Amino acid sequence: MELSGSEIIIQFLKDEGVEHVFGYPGGAVLHIYDAIQKQDDVKHILVRHEQGASHAADGYARATGKPGVCLVTSGPGATNAVTGIATAFMDSIPLVVITGQVPSHAIGSDAFQEVDAVGITRACVKHNFLVKDLNKLAETLKKAFYVATTGRPGPVVVDIPKDITAPHIKIPYEYPENIKLRSYNPNFKGHPRQIKRAVDLLLNAKRPMIYTGGGIILDNASDELRTFVRKLGYPITQTLMGLGAFPGTDPLFIGMLGMHGTYEANMAMHECDVLICIGARFDDRITGVTSKFCPYAQIIHIDIDPASISKTINADIPIVGGAKQVLSEMNKLLDSAEPASNQAALESWWNTIKSWQAQNSFAYAQKGDLIQPQAAVEELYRVTGGDAYITSDVGQHQMFAAQFYPFDEPRRWINSGGLGTMGFGLPAAMGVKLAFPDKDVACVTGEGSIQMCIQELSTCLQYDLPVKIINLNNRYLGMVRQWQEFFYEKRYSHVYMDSLPDFVKLTEAYGHVGIRVDHPDDLHDAMQEAFKLKDRTVFLDIITDQEANVYPMISAGKAHNEMDISPLQQEVQASLKAKGELV
Amino acid sequence: MRHIISLLVENESGALSRISGLFSARGYNIESLTVATTEDQTLSRMTIITVGSDRIIEQISKQLNKLVDVVKLQDFTEGNFIEREMMFVKVRAEGDSQRAEVKRLSDIFRARIIDVTDTTFCIELTGSGDKLDAYIRSMHENNIIEVVRSGSMGILRGEKALTL
């Protein structure tokens, strides 16, 4: 089969099983777009901004587990996509981003719409390629997919000069089934002796703690994790990225940990004597100050990326390997293990944890006729039966969604954890909806974040992607305002969102349905109405309490046991102490 | 502590900037970095001299190993290895006594004079970094016109080798 470079790209994507490409045309990719136009197998979604393309492909990848693909032009096309590429990089999401480049002979001449895409993206990709030879195009694309999806996944950029895609130059094409990369051999199998040591340590723990992250979801290891946790009966906490891997409604799950995690999860981290971390990386939002992190614990760390082990927190038993494989090995060992002798200690540990749980650290107070943002998320949970795909942007609303929408399945909670990218939520929701058209998909956002990629409402209309936008509108950049309240004596610097658009009218202008809610009594009906309109994109503009804060909170330089708790929880703590029920 | 890390990397454009970019992005020190192709034209050999705590050196090795272009890596510091650096020094050499003094010093260091004019010598010297430093210190500061150092390169002693 003789194909041009453009035809090779499309044929390759088809052979690779890619169904959807998110992109935006331009000069350097015109040949490729001509090839796209001539076929129906690979569907192209035209976004309204290249940042939307990379976020949508990212959301698609997070929800499906398949690599997300986007196609953008050279210069500004590539630079606009960078935020989405960096977002995927920080959360280890497999993306393949094809960027057009000026013709080979013009590279380096400051040609129109030329940027060094390989240079610019180098620091935020797992790897990148510049295709210099048409004969290596298919092989390079295969390498890109292989590198993006294996080991610790991540985004890969393939920069393709325009002359490589010229329609009149055709070469034989064969799908490269196998490619060799002598310098890249990700290790999936954990060391058996280390695994045995870890299981022995776990079985003798008196105050054990299981801490898992996004690695479980990326490696599709939820089933193995569930078996593992239930066999042991130990408490589990999950990071923001790991939510849903273990069911959020299971009693063994004691809530998210970290800066805005539950009191019980953070206290248990502080007090535990054995900590097993699987597929998480001891991020600074998780550990608090590292010098006071888990002071009594021996630490087991399982990660597919050796560089994540002992990076910030030293591991006593490091295990390099895929979560799925290591957990199944551990489960086998647990099956054949002697009955554990730590039952009495475990029971007392659980009693301690329950006393912490009794404080209900997420409790919030209803204030007059103001809608509390937490209540809006709780309502979302009720109306969707806890079964929706929830994407979010970044800020207070993101934390409220993570705290008040317990996810029972993996890949349902889609947010930018590492990079913290405002503007991620809406395009990511489009990617999810495209993959799962029959599922409820909601984007929990705020009036700050949504405006960073609001243009994608237009894409939702064009491709019939009826997502629900749950806008927690407090007229403030809430998380920044919260920090200014706590740490800058309420000097609110540039956080008030003045001159906001009328979101209802704006949504209607985009051809969708807008609903405004400003009273708690109307919340339920409005939420129901939004989800009843199955075929419509609905923008629910919820006017919330302006000064609601996210609690509990570990401030900078503090440890897990030094959380700031909400005023309401302070009252609960006082009353529990008075009754002698607080350990 | 000072470490000498030797790498085999794909001989591809961009490999060098990936490696140097990693050091700058993560705030690691590079004291020197040398690179050239090997007998296998698809491979480059790189020697990096870096300074850091054990934890940082471990991270540097791991992060370098993660780069797709890095084929093989070894930290020589713990083992038995040879380290050499090459240097050119151009010095002012005017008048018989000064010329004789430079020549004498160069002989002591087993340096070679590779270019001569009526006012200058260009000297080539190979050795450990310390030896090169000592040579420079032995010269009168005002006499030095120019110093060009290659940065260190290293090789394991005996049968051991960093090869594919």
Image (cartoon, coloured by chain):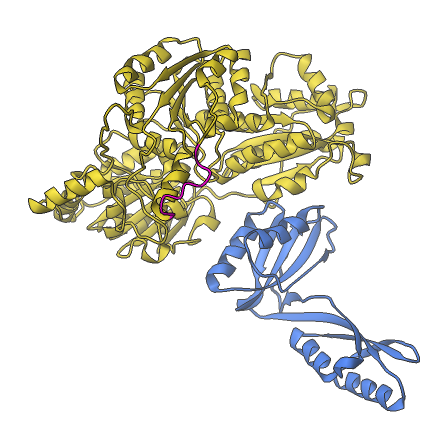
Chain colours: A yellow, B blue
Say whether residue A207 is left or right of residue A283: left
| Residue found at the very far left of the displayed protein | A579
Q: Is residue A526 above or below residue B148?
A: above
Residue A216 in sight in this render: no
Q: Position of residue B100 (x, y in %)?
A: 85, 89
Judging depth in this view, the residue of A229 and A273 nearest the camera is A273
Give the prevailing secondary structure in the magenta stretch.
Answer: loop
A491 magenta-colored: yes
Residue visible at 75% across and 81% down in the picture: B141
Q: Is residue B119 above or below residue A272?
A: below
Judging depth in this view, the residue of A551 and B24 nearest the camera is A551
A316 magenta-colored: no
Judging depth in this view, the residue of A216 and B116 nearest the camera is B116
Say whether residue A167 is left or right of residue A450: right
Residue visible at 55% across and 26% down in the picture: A52
Say whether residue A143 is left or right of residue A194: right
Among the 4 quarters of the image, the one containing residue A492: top left
Say whether residue A304 is left or right of residue A206: right
Q: Position of residue A17 (x, y in %)?
A: 56, 21
Q: Which residues are magenta?
A: A488-496
Residue visible at 33% across and 32% down in the picture: A400
Judging depth in this view, the residue of B67 and A98 nearest the camera is A98
Q: Position of residue B85 (x, y in %)?
A: 70, 70
Q: Is residue A331 above or below residue A521?
A: below
| Residue found at the very far right of the displayed protein | B118
| Residue found at the very far bottom of the displayed protein | B97
Q: Position of residue A134 (x, y in %)?
A: 75, 30
Can you say which quadrant of the picture contains the N terminus of chain A? top right
